[in-house]
Structures are given as structure tokens and as C-alpha cells.
Amino acid sequence: METSSLARRLAARFVAGETLEQAIALSRRLNQEKISVTLDHLGESVTSLEEAARARDVYQSTLAALHESGVEGNVSLKLTQFGVDLSAGECRRNVDQLAAAAADYGLFVRVDMESSEYVDRTLDLVTALHARYHAVGAVIQSYLYRSRQDVEALSERGIRVRLVKGAYLEPPSLAFPRKADADKNFVELMKLLLDRGAYPAIATHDEKMIAATRGYAAERNISRDAFEFQMLYGIRRDLQRQLVADGFRLRLYVPFGRSWYPYYMRRIAERPANALFVLRNLFR
């Protein structure tokens, strides 16, 4: 799959390329369309601390490239890529170095949320690093029962939150099993973030969720500069253009790197509905 020319062409629809240079070039083009970016170097669940250190170094280079190029963007990372399953201490040191660099450059690091077993470790690390550098944010998944409590705690500390629905397969003891309930919670958390959060990011391709966000912002007279929408690169370009044309801030999640095939397979293995989502957008 990774060497197939057809597979590469399909991947190019959703991945910026294999190199940092390609990701920066794409980011420049998106900036010209008034779209900012968050760059994600693909790779999860490292098997050694040496791999984790290499991931850290790639992100250091990414922050430096964003700063030097003047691209309007930040980075997103996963703790499993930084060695959290191997050494909590080494993982924290790795992310600490990036948070310090981001603060020096005037940039920002978003720590992605993974499955429920990582939530406490992720939020503890984000909270500690935010207290030191302020250049660190978190991601909250609306399908988890605990998410309102987490949003309230993060908002009180002024920590920026990206709100997503959630893509991992979780047991009904931890997450809403019905999509309608997860969607309802998404709207409730969105309202909470717009009222009390620090520059929240509403990450969705769901037109109903977007309409609900736009409607609530208008109802509460919330400035369009006080929050942003986020989407995946290559998904719903029609919606992206419309949001920008309507004066909303938009940031695209732009993955790059050689590990695009494991990235797709994990997303599909975690939740088979993700495959249908990607296929629908291939033919839009």
C-alpha cells in the first residue's frame, strides 16, 4: 500500500506529504486562502524511547520551520508518540522541550486526546505544562461522560480546548453509546466553551454542529474572532470555503510523514464508521 502509486494519490488527498518541506509548502497555500493550520507528524505508539526522541526532534524542527517561514500554524502531538507508555518521565521531558520552544517562538502545542485510558495522564501533563509555558492546549471528546467536568476545569485555568466528538471505540460505561447523545453533549460543551473557554476550537465536519455553533455565537453576540472552527485537511472543502467566506476563523489539521498507512488503518480499526466517512469524502 505504501509503495503503490494509486494509494499515494489517494493519501495525497488527506496528507500533506512525507516531508516537513511539503507540509510547510501546503500550509503556505492554505494561509493564502485565509486558513491556518495545525501540523501533525504521523506516528503513534512508539516501541522505544529512541523513537520517541526522534519524534520530539521532528516536532522541534516543525516549530522552527513554522517560526522561520511565518506560516500561521501550530502543532498537535500524541503522548503515545512521545513515549508515555514506556516512561512517563521521559514523555514529559520530551513534551516540555516542545512547550518551551513553542513559548519562545510565540507558537502553540496541542496535545491530542487518545483513548480513555490516557485522559487523566494527558490532562495532568497539559495542566502542568500550561502553568509553566501557557503555550499548551488540550482536546476534549464529547462522547465521554466525564467531558463536561474536564471542560469546566480546563476553562477555569484558561487552557485552550479543541472540542471533538471522539473516534475511539469506548465501552458504554465510559461513553455515550448513541450518536444522538454524543451530539447533544457536543452542543452543550460547545456552548460552555464559547461562554467560558479560552479561544475554543470547535472541530467538526457535521453541518448540524456547525449551524448550532454559528447560531449560538450570534445569539450570544460572540465575536467570530473569539473562537475557531477546525477540520481535517481534504475533508469537506465546500464547507471550509463557506466558513471562510462567511468570516469565520478556520484551522485545518494537516498530517504529514511516512506513517500515513498505519494512521488510516488505526482510525478504521478503532471505529469502522471512519472508513465510510473517508470514502464519502473521496467522491464529494
Image: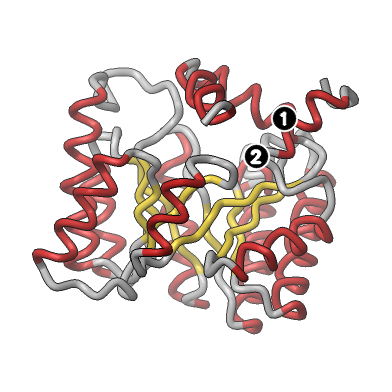
List x then y, in percent, for residue 21: 83, 61
Residue shown at 60%/73% (left/top)? 72
Q: Nearer the viewer, residue 210 or 46?
A: 210
Q: Name the residue under label 2.
A: 14
Quadrant in the rendering for residue 264: top right
Q: Where is residue 139 in the image (x, y as percent from the top left)?
A: 42, 51
Residue indicated by mark 1: 10
Above or below, 173 against 203 in this view is: above
Query: Is 87 situated left or right of 203 in this image?
Result: right
- Indicate left or right for 275 with 45 as reference: left
Task: Report helix, strand or loop for mark 1.
Answer: helix
Residue 267: percent from left, percent from top: 57, 26
Under circle 2, the secondary element is loop
Other-residue count near label 2 (Cα within 10 Å), few / some / many at <14 / 14–19 / ≥20: many
User: Looking at numbered disc 1 in the image, what kind of residue is underneath it?
Assistant: Leu
Please tell me whether residue 71 is drawn above or below residue 6 in the rendered image.
Answer: below
Residue 149 shown left or right of residue 274 in the figure: left
Q: Which residue is drawn at 66% across and 74% down?
A: 71
Q: Work out how far the residue at label 1 is from the one at label 2, CA to CA, in angstroms.
A: 8 Å
Q: Is residue 140 above or below residue 276?
A: below
